[in-house]
Image (cartoon, rainbow, N blue to C red):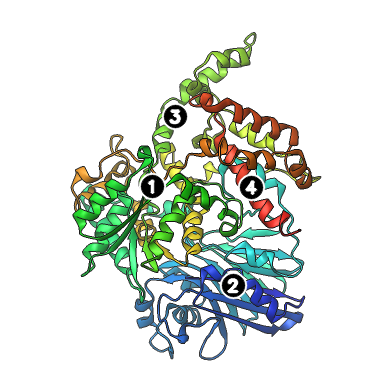
Amino acid sequence: MCGICGYIRRREVTPEQLKKMNDTMYHRGPDDSGEEIYEIAGGYLVGLAQRRLSILDLSALGHQPMHSADGRVVVVYNGEIYNFRELREELADYPFRSDCDTEVIIAAYLKWGLSCVKRFNGMFAIALFDREEEAVYLIRDRIGKKPLYYWYEQEELVFASELKPIMACPGFQAKIDKGVLSRYLFQQYINAPESVYENVYKLAPGAVLKFRGGQISTWSYWNVREAYAEAVKEPVKSYEEAKEQLKALLQRAVSLRMISDVPLGTFLSGGYDSSLVTAIAQAHSAEPVKTFSIGFQEESYNEAPYARAVADYLGTAHTELTISESDMLRMVESIPKYYDEPFADSSQIPTMLVCQLAREQVTVALSGDGGDEFYCGYHIYEKVAQAQKLDAPGAFVHGLCDMPGIKRLDLEKKLPFKVRVIAGNRERETKTQFSAGNYPEMARAMVGGMPSGKQALPVHYPVESRYPVKDWQVCRMLLDMDTYLPGDILCKMDRASMKYSLEARCPILDPDVMDFSYRIPHSYKYAAGDKKHILKEIAYDYMPRELLDRPKKGFGVPLDKWLRGALREQLLFYAGHDFMKRQNLFDESYVSKLVKSYLEKGDRGRGTGENYSGLIWAFFVFQQWYANFHENRNG
């Protein structure tokens, strides 16, 4: 687990500058660092750098950049290849010098070419320099566990695990892409391929980028749509077969992710996913597995007692920390430093706290990420199923509002809020993305006018026809796998864990588990209204049902209380004339009125679609990020 960065440029970047870029990611890899520069044709220099968090082969033999035995290939890489030992047996003719997975990547490329990536079971962001071909390849894992940004301009490429190295690269002009702001305010994150800056992109999950001779090309070796379309051709024939095979695949996935030369544990919230991962890990361990959870003083969203009960039943070595509201508030200031792109999923705060707790004892932690998206766990999936049933009546109401002689606004005001949402949900490409209230319009209105020739991205993802399904629930799950999972959930865990030099591993996102999940009939996942049914049934093989059956809570943060209390003055400053005028990004008049209305409204907007804490928090986080990287940077 590490951070990588580098470049292919004609403009010189000195070794000292490359090291400075690399050291902006010290937290990702405090154990070692390396930087090297090479010359190739066309006047280009190739710089490669890595910060290392030692997990496998702790010796100096794991140092990067790593060269092939013949000197042809150089690699810097962030992540883990869990099946590297199996692959190594197939590569026995290669003269290995180390016992780490990085060298397996090199040997696999030399034997199988770029198709080697399809054999990798892991999470990774790889930069591979083929000196013979004079080409650099960037490769990202299938579901986007590991981040990889790149800046491409004037036939030059700069890449990094985070934005900070790119910001530190000589010549970089940090010009904010205004076109992404409305979508960010609405979604609370920026999904690939966009980034907050112009000419800077995220490599898509499951993609390869090739740079050669000043030109780049990208292609996909795996994606959600194609993997699903291929897998559903061979559905599992029976529920028992599906359960047995899924259980075996999960056992193998957990076992692979327990390979480590450093201490390992699990995150344990007491929910189905983390409890199942922990139970399997404990079954594969001769010693009590170290488990970690945080509790909240606010009982309404405190899950610590449930996690403790699971830990007691499984016999893990459990550590629990109760955190206060002030503990969480102290984390707010660190958000822009470690989430170096605006990111407003507020559960990042308790996630950072549990990562901090785990890092006191372990260097690797297993998580339950992916269970909700692949096995139908979120509450929104119930609402989507209901919306599909009500789509025809909704169309009738929508048509009624458009009849001659009827005033749409007058009629809409008389309709219940939920009816208005269903009636207004008419766009084919965004059917499963219906919104509360007028959030989309507000997100667009908050952003000032676009520069000439520039268009704002739609706040929803207008892509749903790409998924070959009629069931809205399945469609929304696939969409979330493409967007919310990599753009929000996995980004949140990567930055939170890397803040403390902690490696987070996700067995449910094992490639074999993901591909098999597509073969499982949806009725086994959502059975008569029971979300995650098959995953729950596997969990019950390890733990009593009564330990797990309860409403889903998640990590709660009292945003309204904070924004109207401890963060009020800071919010007002960010929404003030002077700050917004310097930015020239937002509609000053609209935003200032919106913030004032929000602060005055209090809890009266709850349940009406007029509680705007999500938009206000996303705005606050953006402004905090801007102050950190632009105001402070510019003095």
Q: In this orientation, does residue 183 appear?
A: no
The foreground one among 563 and 491 is 563
Instruction: Name the image quarter holding the C terminus.
Output: bottom right
Look at mark 3 in the image and give the residue it sits on: 387
Residue 54, above or below 203: below
Q: Earlier in the sequence, mark 2 or mark 4?
A: 2
Under mark 3, the amino acid is Ala
Q: Residues within 10 Å of mark 2 (few under 14, many from 20)?
A: some
Q: Amino acid at mark 2?
A: Tyr
Q: Which image quadrant for residue 503?
A: bottom left
Q: Amino acid at mark 1?
A: Asp
Task: Of the two numbered discs 2 and 1 on the same chain, state the one appearing first in sequence.
Answer: 2
What residue sits right under mark 4 in the picture?
Answer: 622
For disc 2, the marked residue is 137
The disc, 1 or 4, on the residue closer to the chain's N-terminal end is 1
Q: Which residue appears at 51% of the width and 36% of the height?
A: 561
Q: What's the CA distance linking mark 3 and mark 1?
A: 19 Å
Choose the circle earlier in sequence order: 3 or 2: 2
**Residue located beneath label 1 in the image:** 372
User: Which residue is found at the position 19% from the left and 54% from the top?
Assistant: 313
Q: Give the residue displayed 42% in from the left and 63% down from the top.
A: 504
